[in-house]
């Protein structure tokens, strides 16, 4: 029992002496002849060149589609609806008859107006002939001319009233809405049918003020839909004033839609190529935070000294990240292995894949 106690005391004293000796006589790092840190204590890292490539910076915004035109056809004469020739949702052609209002005595009034014009022309020509021979006064000639013009005006009005009994499409499009049924009595100004123009199709979106200066009319755009359909188009309109509530600018894009596959009111992702930019392509894991919370990368210079460089991320993807080109990138190499363990200002041993035989 006593021998165990003595042995424990000896071990405790030995450990204590070893700790005190480490404090009083700390180990001295080996240095070379220039006073630099020896190679044995230098950390090894792997580095790669900061290669530069050009990419197109893109602006991505969400918008919605809308018909390029929408027209509500209204009655221009009164009467009963006798025919609706086209079902709702049907594709229609310009000047195609879509519905009819009862004619009643309108055709008869056109016939009578034509007869009145013919009679007035005879009277005017006779008065003109007599006036040329000196057998008629200028007053009589003027009276017959006025009567002829009045008859022609009444004929034109009768023809327009008759033509207004046929409701026609103003342009190629789709009959979107029907506001009438057969037998309805309509008065001048009543809504009858709504026609929309879906070709070209428009896409509307709103752009923040920091992005609007980089855009202009005619720039190409890419339109992506929820069903994976992709179309190309161009910017056709840009608002000259921002909306007061959001400080955003309305822009409109147009795209061909001859097959009417793009519907009005769809959500669309709009991508606009803005400008070419020089970038470095790195792995997402190579982005780190420094003590100040800045996002950046660890690099080494020509003397293998470690630096932290804050970066601007241009585009993030699953397998890579594009960062804005560093101005002094030609003199720097990216630390790809060991970046989590280095300190700014320390010198490291930098090995490249080529040096290690890695291709």
Image (tube, rainbow, N blue to C red):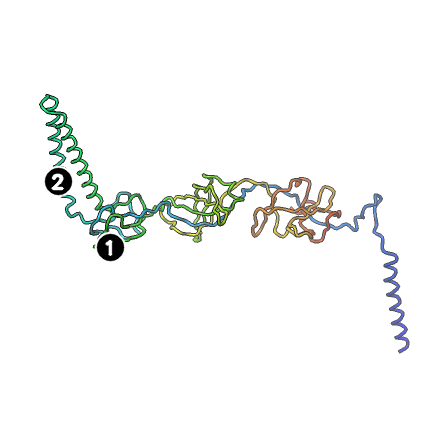
Residue at the (61%, 51%) spot, across then down: 284
Residue at the (51%, 46%) spot, across then down: 208
Q: Which residue is mark 2?
A: 112
Q: Which residue is mark 1?
A: 181
Up-down relation of residue 181 to residue 141 (above or below) = below
Q: Is residue 357 visible?
A: no
Q: Crowding at label 1, few (<14), some or many (≥20) Cα neighbours within 10 Å?
A: some
Residue 151 in percent (x, y) is at 16, 36
Q: Quadrant where the N terminus lies? A: bottom right
Q: Is residue 229 visible?
A: yes
Nearer-the-camera pick, 347 or 109: 109
Up-down relation of residue 357 to residue 146 (above or below) = below
Quadrant location of residue 119?
A: top left
- Horizontally, residue 138 falls left or right of residue 221, namely left
Outermost residue toward the top in this view? 133
Outermost residue toward the bottom in this view? 1
Residue at the (71%, 43%) spot, across then down: 301
Q: Crowding at label 2, few (<14), some or many (≥20) Cα neighbours within 10 Å?
A: some
Q: Say which element carries label 2.
A: helix
């Amino acid at each position: 029992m006593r021998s165990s106690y003595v042995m424990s005391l000896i071990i405790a004293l030995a450990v204590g002496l070893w700790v005190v000796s480490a404090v009083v006589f700390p180990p001295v790092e080996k240095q070379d002849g220039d006073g630099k840190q020896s190679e044995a204590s230098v950390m090894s890292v792997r580095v790669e060149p900061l290669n530069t490539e050009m990419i197109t910076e893109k602006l991505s915004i969400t918008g919605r589609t809308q018909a390029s035109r929408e027209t509500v056809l209204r009655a221009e004469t009164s009467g009963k609806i006798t025919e609706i020739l086209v079902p709702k949702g049907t594709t229609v052609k310009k000047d195609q008859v879509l519905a009819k209002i009862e004619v009643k005595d309108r055709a008869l009034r056109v016939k009578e107006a034509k007869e009145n014009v013919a009679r007035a022309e005879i009277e005017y020509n006779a008065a003109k002939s007599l006036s040329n021979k000196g057998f008629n006064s200028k007053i009589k000639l003027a009276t017959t001319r006025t009567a002829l013009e009045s008859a022609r005006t009444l004929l034109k009005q009768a023809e327009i009233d008759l033509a207004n009994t046929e409701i026609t499409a103003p342009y190629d499009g789709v009959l979107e809405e029907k506001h009438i049924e057969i037998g309805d009595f309509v008065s001048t100004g009543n809504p009858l049918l709504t026609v929309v123009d879906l070709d070209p199709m428009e896409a509307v979106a709103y752009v923040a003020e920091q992005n609007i200066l980089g855009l202009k009319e005619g720039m190409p755009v890419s339109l992506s839909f929820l069903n994976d359909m992709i179309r190309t188009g161009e910017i056709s309109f840009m608002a000259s004033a921002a909306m007061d509530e959001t400080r955003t600018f309305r822009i409109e894009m147009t795209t061909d839609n001859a097959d009417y596959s793009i519907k009005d009111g769809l959500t669309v992702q709009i991508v606009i190529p803005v400008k070419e930019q020089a970038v470095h392509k790195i792995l997402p894991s190579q982005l780190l935070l420094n003590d100040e919370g800045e996002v950046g990368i660890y690099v080494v210079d020509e003397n293998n000294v470690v630096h932290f460089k804050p970066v601007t991320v241009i585009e993030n993807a699953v397998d890579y990240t594009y960062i804005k080109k560093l101005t002094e990138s030609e003199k720097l190499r990216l630390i790809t292995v060991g970046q989590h363990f280095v300190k700014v200002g320390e010198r490291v041993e930098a090995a490249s894949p080529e040096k290690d035989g890695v291709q």
